[in-house]
Every structure is written in structure tokens, then in C-alpha cells.
């Protein structure tokens, strides 16, 4: 028996060909392939496990008359093909209307003409439930003209292509309308992100943000009909070979279609994400006229936020239009035809975990993003201040290892040159510039010189800083402490940013990374001068980020915990409390460069910020107890100091990373 298949290289088509070839050892399948896609057939032959004598590629083009197949090939096929399966189509909501018209409608018309020319026995059209449009109610298999809401080109062209077969095809025909086709129920295999897979990224993001046991609020939505590819292939193969069914349509759908809320919860369970225990029925917003929603969505700020959110979740904007999908599908004809075959739709709960696992291992968009540091900084100019030691030097080494043009800025030339040799040994280009960043004119000059020498500033890491640990009551006669910290930590960093931004604007790219402190989140006592200067820089950064987002200039604040650097050496207490190494701190800078988050902070820092927001008085009392437990440093008191007490060490261990 001979078959002809269009769309044999596609997800459903390749599996249908495999099924047809397995029917018996003598069956032969001819399949349409474009000439420039012939090399792709080798993988298909390997999958099918047959020679080219049983699976025969026929060169053609769906958009050409008679499928663009030569007269010679048509002559050798004439009268031999008993079943012609037409699966080639556009299954993409985002494709242009013109492309969908050319492939879905004109392509089907070309297929019909070809089937008549070669005297095929029966045409089997793989249509779609989209042919029903947005029909409000139950759509039966014997319904066609009743379709509604065909404004979207995908719905319209699927309806029109089916109409071509129904009204123009002189060869006997059968129509199959699959539901939303997902991966194989036994392997999870799928070849692209579509349908419910669009929501997987949001579920994954929810899993990362919220514990699985925490209840969340979601949507109820309409009923979405999901079927695995193996059911669709098995059902088509079985029904196509059953006698007496010509001129009929079969819904290859799940008789127990579920609402969007239930489907999302099934996949949330599969992905170990929190379930939506409280669901809002999206139809309750139906009282708002459509033109109001369209007008709101067209408002530039709203439109941009929606697009950014959808892009971040890898979801096409059109997906939101189908949240209230109104159509249900009766599949009694298909169930009747399949009776006794053992072919049925498996419950989504039984194989959802396989779909999730396959997606997360093979199709998650994050797998295809270059998240290497070298992918971000290789050949780019990375300016690091305070680069002669500590966090700055460790950061410079990592950037050099990644192939960046590392610009090391520090105040003391001797130390800077020593550090340069160590950084240069790691690779990349290394350039040094001496500058006291607290000298605002010098800050301007160093950026100008860097741009003159290297052409740009792609990354600016504001690491140079000054910390003073002294209580307010001990600072009444030391107002200059506040001036010095503000001059370097805020004004100096700000001057570098302001001088670099015009060059970043000109190239429409750039990234400013500010090394802030966990103290801004915890509000630890005795650091009022230091924390205030860092908080000022944090506030500026938040404001500036909103102004430069459209220019692809990013800003990241790192609320760094306590780091083992020369800056904390005067405080002997820190010799006995947990700190992170400069290399670990540099890893946080690397994370900032690669992922470009708005903020990087430890969990303890975030907890402290939330606690201050929700229970400010309680936190004030707790901080006061810590203030009384930890005295001023020996340097602040002007004596040699004493050993740390067990109570001090215990609290420091418990509040790991916070400055006391």
C-alpha cells in the first residue's frame, strides 16, 4: 500500500510516517520535501529505520500549483496512492496573515489539485480545533459553517483550508481536528514551545520565588483541550484505515477538557511550583467593554510593561487573548470510530511530569542563552574602581580571565601596579589609571582619559569606598566623617557614572554596577555615615535606571555582606565573625554582569529589609540591643581594644554578614 504525506518533516507528520511504515513491511510512503531541505531527511530515515526504497522523498513546494511536483513524479504516483495525508501547515499564532494564507489556504488548494491529478484514493486533512474559531458553546464534529470569531488569521485560515477540502475536493476525504497537541505521553518529546508550554516559564519563575507549599492566586479561564502527539497519530492512523467513514470529521480531543486554572496547577505540581489555590474567573472582567481593554493596552507605558513582561516569560502577546477560550468540543464520532481499538486520551495528570521534564531539559529558553562571563565582557571595556586590593582586585582578575579589557582604577600607584601584574597574568588586556575618586575633577579626567585611550566604557564597577564604624554620639565633633564617606561613596561614584553615561548613550549599551552594603537593608547601628552614603547611591541608581532602560543601559546594586578586606581591618571584632572572601564577593559582581538584575542581596539582607518594613519598632529595639552589645571599635575609642565576648560572637554568627 502506498501513502503520500505532506508535512512529513514536522512533529506530527514524522511520527505518522513512522506509524504507517510499521503497518506492514510492504507499505511505501512518499513524502513532500523542499529541495533545500533534502539534507534534513537523513535524520528522518534514521528515525524511521527504513531505506529510501520505502520512504521516498518527492521534491516540491506546498505554495506552488500541484505542490510544485514534476510531471515525471506525478505520472509515477498516479493511481498508486491510496491515502494522502495533508499535515503541512502553519501552526503559529504569531505568523503573518499573508504567510498563513499562502500555506494554510492556498497550500491546501494546491494539495487538492494534486490529489485529483494523481487519482488518490482518499484525502486525509489534518485541520485543527481552531477551525471552530471562538465559537461560544459546544462545537460538534458535524458543525462547520457555525464557526464564530474568525478575525484572527490563524483561526480564519484553518477554517478556510478545511472549507477548500469540503467544497472543492472531488476525491473522497476525511477531516481530523486535533486539540492542542503536546509532547509524547511516554517520553515527553516535543519539538517546539507552543500552547501550554508558553506558561512553563512563568511556573518556573514562581517556583524560584515562592516555596511549593505556599498558596497563590491565579486565574480560572476557559477550557483548553490538550492531547499528546501519540494519541493524535494513533487515532489518525486507525480511523484512516477504517472503512465507511469518508466525508466525516473527527475531533481528536480530550472528552474531559480542563480549565486553564486546572491545567496550570497540574503543570505546577509537575514542576514542583506552588499551586493556585485561589482562582479568579477571568470572565468576571467581561463586563468591561473590549475597546476599553484595547485602549488601555495601547497606552505606551502599559503596552511597554506588558511587552516586557511577556518577553521575559517568553510568551507571545496573543496568548492572553485565549484565557477565556469559550469553545468545548464534542468528540462522539471519533470515540465511536475508535471503539475497540484501545486508543484513548490519557489523563493529563499521568504524563504532565514527562512534558515538564523534557521541556526543562531540552527546550527551556534559558538553556540557549549565553550565560558565560566571557560572552558578556570579552573585548569590552570594564572599569573597576578600588582595584588595587580586595573586591576590586578579585573582580578585575575574573574579568581578565573572561577576556575583557580591564581598566583598574585606584588611588595608590604602587599598589595598583602590583595588582596589575597579578591581573595581567589572568589574561585579557589590563590598563591602570591612578585616581582619587573623591576628587571630583580627577574622576572626570580619568573617564575622559579612558574613553580617549580605549574608545568607550561598557561596564563601570563602582567599588571604591570608605567605611567608618562609629556611633552617632561618638561623632558629634567628627562631622567630617559624614563628609568624607559621602564624598567618596556617593559623590565620587556619581561623578564617574555621570561622566560615563554620555558614552553609553552614544553606543546604546552599558552597565553600571554599584557595590553597596547590606547595611542599607539592615540599618545596623554605628554605620550611619557609611550607610547613609551608600543609601544615597542606591536611591540615585533606582531613579536613573528608570530613565535609561529604553537605551539598554542597565544599573545593578549589590548589597554586599561583610567582606574580608583591608577596609574592615581596624575593627578587631571582625576577626572572629563570619565574612565572605573577596573572591566570593567578585562572584556576585560576575552574577550582576551576566544576569543584569536590579539588585543582588543575601537572603538575610532581604529579610532584614522586610522586617524593618513590617515591624519597624520591633527591629529598632532589636538593633538597639545589638548596639549596646557591640561597643565602638578600638580605633574609634582610641585604645587597644579587647577580646570579643561569646555573646558578641554568637550574635555575629547568627546574623552572618551584617556589619555590627
Image (spheres, rainbow, N blue to C red):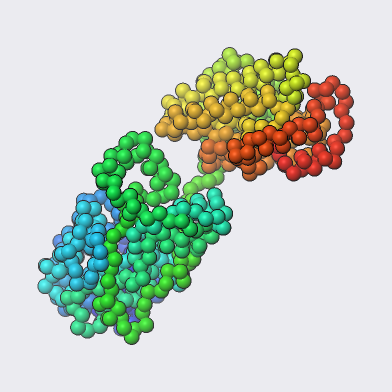
The reply, left or right, for residue 432 in relation to residue 163 is right
When the figure is inspected, residue 285 is found, relative to residue 599, above or below; the finding is: below
Residue 351 image position (x, y, % from top left):
46, 69
The reply, left or right, for residue 166 in relation to residue 561 is left
State which quarter of the image contains the C terminus: top right
For image coordinates 37% across by 62% down, the residue present is 259
Residue 229 image position (x, y, % from top left):
37, 69
For image coordinates 81% across by 29% down, the residue present is 631
Towards the viewer: 114 or 411: 411
Which of the 4 image quarters holds residue 183? bottom left
For image coordinates 26% across by 46% down, the residue present is 290
Residue 575 image position (x, y, % from top left):
81, 36
Towards the viewer: 634 or 114: 634
Residue 586 image position (x, y, % from top left):
64, 38
Towards the viewer: 16 or 519: 519
For image coordinates 55% across by 45% down, the residue present is 372
The reply, left or right, for residue 106 in relation to residue 528 is left
Which of the 4 image quarters holds residue 219? bottom left
On the question of residue 397 being in view, the answer is no
When the figure is inspected, residue 75 is found, relative to residue 615, above or below; the finding is: below
When the figure is inspected, residue 13 is found, relative to residue 26, above or below; the finding is: above
Callout count: 0
When the figure is inspected, residue 119 is found, relative to residue 658, above or below; the finding is: below
Residue lying farthest to the front in this orientation: 617
On the question of residue 328 being in view, the answer is yes
State which quarter of the image contains the N terminus: bottom left
Amino acid at each position: 500500500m502506498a501513502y503520500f504525506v505532506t508535512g512529513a518533516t514536522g512533529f506530527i507528520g514524522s511520527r505518522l510516517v513512522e506509524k504507517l511504515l510499521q503497518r506492514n513491511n510492504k507499505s511505501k510512503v512518499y513524502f513532500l520535501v523542499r529541495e533545500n531541505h533534502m539534507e534534513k531527511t537523513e535524520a528522518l530515515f534514521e528515525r524511521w529505520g527504513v531505506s529510501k526504497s520505502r520512504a521516498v522523498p518527492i521534491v516540491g513546494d506546498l505554495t506552488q500549483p500541484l505542490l510544485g511536483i514534476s510531471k515525471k513524479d506525478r505520472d509515477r504516483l498516479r493511481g498508486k496512492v491510496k491515502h494522502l495525508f495533508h499535515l503541512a501547515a502553519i501552526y503559529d499564532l504569531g505568523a503573518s496573515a499573508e504567510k498563513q494564507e499562502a500555506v494554510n489556504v492556498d497550500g491546501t488548494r494546491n494539495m487538492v489539485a494534486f490529489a485529483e491529478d494523481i487519482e488518490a484514493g482518499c484525502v486525509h486533512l489534518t485541520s485543527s480545533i481552531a477551525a471552530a474559531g471562538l465559537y461560544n458553546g459546544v462545537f460538534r464534529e458535524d458543525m462547520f459553517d457555525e464557526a464564530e470569531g474568525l478575525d484572527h488569521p490563524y483561526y480564519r485560515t484553518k477554517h478556510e483550508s478545511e472549507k477548500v477540502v469540503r467544497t472543492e475536493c472531488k476525491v473522497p476525504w476525511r477531516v481530523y481536528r486535533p486539540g492542542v497537541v503536546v509532547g509524547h505521553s511516554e517520553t515527553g518529546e516535543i519539538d517546539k514551545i507552543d500552547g501550554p508550554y508558553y506558561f512553563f516559564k512563568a511556573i518556573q519563575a514562581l517556583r524560584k520565588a515562592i516555596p511549593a507549599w505556599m498558596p497563590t492566586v491565579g486565574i480560572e479561564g476557559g477550557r483548553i483541550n490538550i492531547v499528546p502527539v501519540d494519541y493524535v497519530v494513533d487515532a489518525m492512523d486507525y480511523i484512516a484505515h477504517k472503512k465507511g467513514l469518508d466525508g466525516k470529521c473527527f475531533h481528536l480531543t480530550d472528552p474531559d477538557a480542563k480549565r486553564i486554572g486546572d491545567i496550570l496547577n497540574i503543570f505546577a505540581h509537575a514542576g514542583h511550583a506552588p499551586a493556585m489555590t485561589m482562582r479568579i474567573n477571568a470572565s468576571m472582567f467581561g463586563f468591561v467593554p473590549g475597546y476599553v481593554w484595547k485602549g488601555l493596552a495601547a497606552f505606551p507605558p502599559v503596552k511597554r510593561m506588558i511587552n516586557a513582561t511577556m518577553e521575559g516569560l517568553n510568551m507571545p502577546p496573543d496568548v492572553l487573548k485565549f484565557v477565556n477560550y469559550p469553545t468545548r468540543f464534542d468528540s462522539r464520532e471519533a470515540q465511536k470510530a475508535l471503539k475497540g481499538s484501545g486508543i484513548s486520551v490519557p489523563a493529563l495528570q499521568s504524563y504532565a511530569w514527562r512534558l515538564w521534564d523534557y521541556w526543562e531539559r531540552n527546550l527551556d529558553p534559558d538553556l540557549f542563552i549565553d550565560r558565560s562571563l566571557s560572552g558578556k565582557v570579552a573585548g569590552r571595556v570594564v572599569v573597576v574602581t578600588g582595584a588595587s586590593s580586595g573586591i576590586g582586585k578579585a573582580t578585575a582578575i575574573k574579568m581578565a580571565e573572561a577576556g575583557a579589557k580591564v581598566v583598574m582604577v585606584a588611588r595608590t600607584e604602587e599598589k595598583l601596579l602590583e595588582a596589575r601584574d597579578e591581573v595581567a597574568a589572568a589574561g585579557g588586556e589590563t590598563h591602570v589609571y591612578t585616581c582619587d575618586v573623591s576628587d571630583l575633577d580627577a574622576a572626570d579626567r580619568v573617564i575622559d582619559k579612558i574613553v580617549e585611550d580605549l574608545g568607550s566604557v561598557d561596564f563601570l564597577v563602582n567599588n571604591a569606598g570608605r567605611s567608618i564604624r562609629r556611633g552617632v554620639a561618638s561623632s558629634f565633633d567628627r562631622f567630617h566623617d559624614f563628609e568624607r564617606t559621602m564624598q567618596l561613596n556617593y559623590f565620587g561614584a556619581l561623578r564617574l557614572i555621570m561622566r560615563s553615561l554620555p558614552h553609553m548613550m552614544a553606543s546604546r549599551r552599558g552597565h553600571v554596577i554599584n557595590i553597596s552594603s547590606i547595611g542599607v537593608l539592615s540599618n545596623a547601628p554605628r554605620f550611619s555615615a557609611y550607610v547613609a552614603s551608600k543609601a544615597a547611591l542606591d536611591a540615585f541608581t533606582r531613579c536613573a535606571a528608570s530613565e535609561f532602560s529604553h537605551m539598554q543601559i542597565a544599573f545593578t546594586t549589590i548589597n554586599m555582606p561583610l567582606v574580608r578586606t583591608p577596609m574592615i581591618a581596624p575593627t578587631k571584632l571582625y576577626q572572629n565573625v563570619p565574612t565572605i572572601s573577596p573572591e566570593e564577593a567578585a562572584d556576585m559582581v560576575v552574577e550582576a554582569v551576566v544576569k543584569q538584575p536590579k539588585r543582588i542581596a543575601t537572603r538575610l539582607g532581604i529579610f532584614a529589609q522586610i522586617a524593618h518594613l513590617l515591624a519597624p519598632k520591633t527591629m529598632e529595639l532589636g538593633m538597639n540591643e545589638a548596639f549596646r552589645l557591640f561597643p565602638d571599635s578600638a580605633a574609634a575609642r582610641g585604645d587597644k581594644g579587647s577580646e570579643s565576648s561569646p555573646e558578641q560572637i554568637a550574635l555575629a554568627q547568627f546574623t552572618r554578614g551584617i556589619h555590627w
